[in-house]
Amino acid sequence: MANFLFGSRNGSHALGRVNDMAMGWQKTRKTFRHGRLAQALVEVAVARLETDGVEALSLREIARDAGVNHRAVYRHFPDKLSLLARVAEEGWRRMERRVKQQTTGKPAGEQTLRAAGVGFYLFARDHPNLFALMAGPRINVKGAFPALEAAMTETMVVFRKPFLELGLVPELARVRTALFVSALQGITTQILHGRVHVSRAKAKDFVADACQRLFEGLC
């Protein structure tokens, strides 16, 4: 799946984004001093990814942005793939928080799944480049990054629960969840790319309705 790179930025908007990034990177200094360099580097990488896309990510650029020697980066991330895996893992952790925030207080079953789908879409809408990395070609082909797989699995728990609550056996619920999330990812991608013409104001309701129809079709 292609990365989601949206439009051209006008000068004032681009300047604002750069200033926001600079402020975010400056905040990582405290993290460095507390011995959490790896996490700070991930935050720097996410900031650059959000602004410039995955092509802008390199170990040397991340080191420069963070103000550390590139050798320090290689101690935590021996190659670009390992950095991408950690950034994608961070994305799934953030998506999980967004989905759980959206489903808090919702009734079990269909209402929870609708809310989870909306949370999925809102995360993708607000972080299109990070979502593109997460939803793109599989990073962990050789199984070298178990933490990434764990983050994805933990996010899927929220989507699987409504199917389990219907009384489906775990394996069938897993398959239904995979189909649901795959369709949701496709719908979200089409909206973000403008191939499904729905306004920003109506997109949440559109996604919620789509989730309900998917749930009904899979049950």
Image: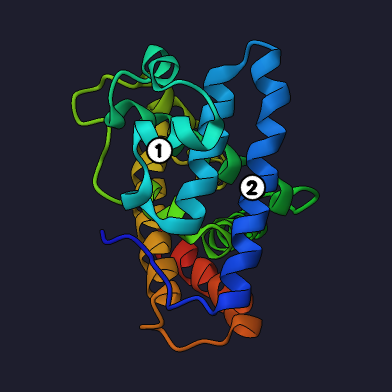
Q: Which amino acid does label 2 sit on?
A: Ala
* Residue 39 shown left or right of residue 52 in the figure: right
Looking at the image, which residue is at 52% across and 20% down? 38
Q: Nearer the viewer, residue 165 or 52?
A: 52
- Res 167 visible: no
The residue carrying mark 1 is 61
The residue carrying mark 2 is 22
Among numbered discs 1 and 2, the one appearing first in the sequence: 2
Which element carries disc 2, helix, strand or loop?
helix
Q: Quadrant of residue 141?
A: top left
Q: Nearer the viewer, residue 215 or 120?
A: 120
Where residue 145 appears, x then y in whole percent?
A: 33, 22
Q: How is the image coloured?
A: rainbow
Looking at the image, which residue is at 38% across and 65% down? 4
**Residue 146: mark in rendering:** none
Looking at the image, which residue is at 44% across and 67% down? 188
Where residue 51 appears, x then y in whole percent?
A: 50, 57
Q: In this view, does 208 lie above or below 153?
A: below
Q: How far apart are marks 1 and 2 (CA)?
A: 14 Å
